[in-house]
């Protein structure tokens, strides 16, 4: 017999009747919904403000809908434009560039000059492949 662990009063055993524990679930003992979508009011600009930001409607139409949202987005746009025009001062840029370590250019090395290391497992696979190739060639020539 399964015991219903969901309490109708939110968590204490005192609110449960004996008929609520075990057996067929009563309407009072059904488990609560774990997840549900709750629409949030506010926090998002209205549809007209979204269309104004996308360039689909005029600013005056958007102002009639939500003047507060339009003013907020205008201030955000002005601040973004101001920051786009900002330039790092030359002395700061020079200090940044001086702090980057200069690495000597690396001369490329040909594959024939590089050292080759082969693990035991790799050597065994290469040997098996060469043996199989020898068997195939021997079979074809015979």
Image (cartoon, grey):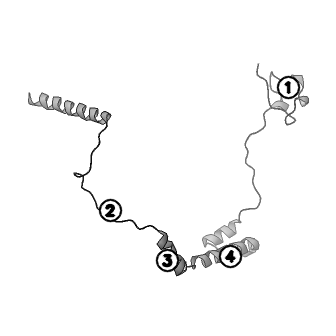
First along the sequence among labels 4 and 2: 4
Q: What residue appears at the point 46 percent right and 68 percent down from the top-left corner?
A: 100
Q: What residue appears at the point 53 percent right and 80 percent down from the top-left corner?
A: 91
Residue 84 pos. (x, y %): 57, 76
Q: Nearer the viewer, residue 35 or 115?
A: 115
At mark 4, the secondary structure is helix
Residue 54, numbered circle: none
First along the sequence among labels 4 and 3: 4
The residue wearing badge 4 is 74
At mark 1, the secondary structure is helix
Q: Quadrant of the N terminus?
A: top right
3D distance between C-alphas at marks 4 and 3: 35 Å
49 relative position to 5: left or right: left
Residue 106, numbered circle: 2
Mark 3 is surrounded, within 10 Å at the Cα level, by few (under 14), some (14 to 19) or many (20 or more) other residues, namely few
87 relative position to 101: left or right: right
> Quadrant of the rendered structure where residue 106 is?
bottom left
The residue wearing badge 1 is 20
3D distance between C-alphas at marks 1 and 4: 59 Å
Mark 4 is surrounded, within 10 Å at the Cα level, by few (under 14), some (14 to 19) or many (20 or more) other residues, namely few
Nearer to us: label 4 or label 3: 3
First along the sequence among labels 1 and 4: 1
At mark 3, the secondary structure is helix
3D distance between C-alphas at marks 2 and 3: 25 Å
| Residue 111, above or below 35 | below
First along the sequence among labels 2 and 3: 3
Q: What residue appears at the point 64 percent right and 69 percent down from the top-left corner?
A: 51
The residue wearing badge 3 is 94
């Amino acid at each position: 017999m399964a015991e219903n662990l969901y309490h109708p009063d939110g968590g204490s055993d005192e609110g449960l009747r004996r008929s609520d524990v075990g057996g067929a679930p009563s309407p009072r003992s059904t488990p609560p919904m774990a997840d549900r979508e709750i629409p949030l009011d506010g926090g998002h600009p209205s549809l007209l403000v979204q269309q104004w930001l996308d360039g689909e409607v005029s600013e005056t139409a958007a102002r009639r809908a939500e003047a507060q949202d339009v003013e907020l987005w205008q201030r955000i746009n002005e601040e973004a434009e101001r920051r786009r025009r900002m330039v790092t001062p030359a002395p700061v840029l020079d200090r940044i560039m001086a702090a980057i370590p200069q690495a000597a250019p690396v001369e490329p090395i040909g594959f024939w000059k590089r050292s080759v290391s082969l693990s035991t497992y790799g050597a065994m696979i290469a040997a098996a492949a060469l043996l199989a190739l020898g068997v195939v060639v021997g079979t074809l020539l015979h």
